[in-house]
């Protein structure tokens, strides 16, 4: 169900619609005028997971509609903090699109990147596929106690999906945080694992690509073939040592991938 509210909705522990505290069945979208970000997401302690999107984000119209479509498909209770005029504009702009369009949109990256540790890569090769955190937890009793995203307020069902970046440092921050045992946003030394570069066009064509308003992801599993294009580790990226920083490894791996495949993966921080 969608609960439409005006812009500036005050997010707190108290849920004014259910008259009790929020639970995982609720999710919030806020359209803002922020100059500090295009998108910002995460949970607030004892509140609902919230996606904030600024009008300065060129794709804000697509974002709000993908958010609605994706979360309606999961039977979420959706709180929309957006004006009637902006919602109507987004609906008209979105047209016949769907959050699981089976093609790449003109603004979407041609390659998606998933970062993982060296140890996990060895397991991935044996499985011939990527698996979501929840599947790995069911299959492996010794798997991690909880996903690192839990510390950022991610809902439990986020772990049903494999998350990707389009060239950013974000995946390496996850690897770094796992090594440190807590979320670490600083660009400090760590041991890089691997960056896996996937063909996004093929993933979309085969109906596997999911858009939730902020992320590009795949549910449950993704076979390595025919989607995996390149595996970047510290050696293949051209680094001199297996000790690096997330920024250094991201830049080196993206540059090497672009060189080898005449691609245009954009490094963002």
Image (cartoon, grey):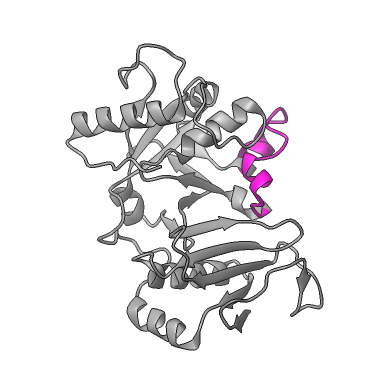
- Tell how many labels: 0
Which residue appears at 64% of the width and 48% of the height?
A: 152
Residue 146 belongs to magenta span: yes
The residue at 58%/83% (across/down) is: 6
Q: Which residue in the rendered view is the most extreme toward the right?
A: 20
Where in the figure is residue 68, as x and y percent of width and height? 51, 72
Nearer to me, 226 or 266: 266
Q: Is residue 200 left or right of residue 114?
A: left
Q: Is residue 202 above or below residue 19?
A: above
The verdict on residue 180 being magenta is no
Place residue 226 in its image quadrant. Answer: top left
The quadrant in which residue 111 appears is top left
- Which is nearer the eye, 67 or 83? 83
Q: Nearer the viewer, residue 224 or 144?
A: 144
Question: x, y percentage for residue 81?
Answer: 57, 77
Seen in the image, is 231 located left or right of residue 32?
left
Q: Residue furthest left?
A: 262
Residue at (33, 79) in percent of width and height? 93
In this rendering, the answer to whether 82 lies above or below 228 is below
Q: Residue furthest front?
A: 35
x then y, percent, for residue 169: 43, 38
Q: Position of residue 250 (x, y in %)?
A: 38, 31
Of all residues shown, which one is farthest toward the top?
Answer: 240
Assign the C terminus to one quadrant of the image. top left
Quadrant that contains the N terminus:
bottom right
**Left or right side of 112 for 44:** right
Q: Which residues are magenta?
A: 135-155
Q: Residue at x 64, y 44 (%)?
A: 134
């Amino acid at each position: 169900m969608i609960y439409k509210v005006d812009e500036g909705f005050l997010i707190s522990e108290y849920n004014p619609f259910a008259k009790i505290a929020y639970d995982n069945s609720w999710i919030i979208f806020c359209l803002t005028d922020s100059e500090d970000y295009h998108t910002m997401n995460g949970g607030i302690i004892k509140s609902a997971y919230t996606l904030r999107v600024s009008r300065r984000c060129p794709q804000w119209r697509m974002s709000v509609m993908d958010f609605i479509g994706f979360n309606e498909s999961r039977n979420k209770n959706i709180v929309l903090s957006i004006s009637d005029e902006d919602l109507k504009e987004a609906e008209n702009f979105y047209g016949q699109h769907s959050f699981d369009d089976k093609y790449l949109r003109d603004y979407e990256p041609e390659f998606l990147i998933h970062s993982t540790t060296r140890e996990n890569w060895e397991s991935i090769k044996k499985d011939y596929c990527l698996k979501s955190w929840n599947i790995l937890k069911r299959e492996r009793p010794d798997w991690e106690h909880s996903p690192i995203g839990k510390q950022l307020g991610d809902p439990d069902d986020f772990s049903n999906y494999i998350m990707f970046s389009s060239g950013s440092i974000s995946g390496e921050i996850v690897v770094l945080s796992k090594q440190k045992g807590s979320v670490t946003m600083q660009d400090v030394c760590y041991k890089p694992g691997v960056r896996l570069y996937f063909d996004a066009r093929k993933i979309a064509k085969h109906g596997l690509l999911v858009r939730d308003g902020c992320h590009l992801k795949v549910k449950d599993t993704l076979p390595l073939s025919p989607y995996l294009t390149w595996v970047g580790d510290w050696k293949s990226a051209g680094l001199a040592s297996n000790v690096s920083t997330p920024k250094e490894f991201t830049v080196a791996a993206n540059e090497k991938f672009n060189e080898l495949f005449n691609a245009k993966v954009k490094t963002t921080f």
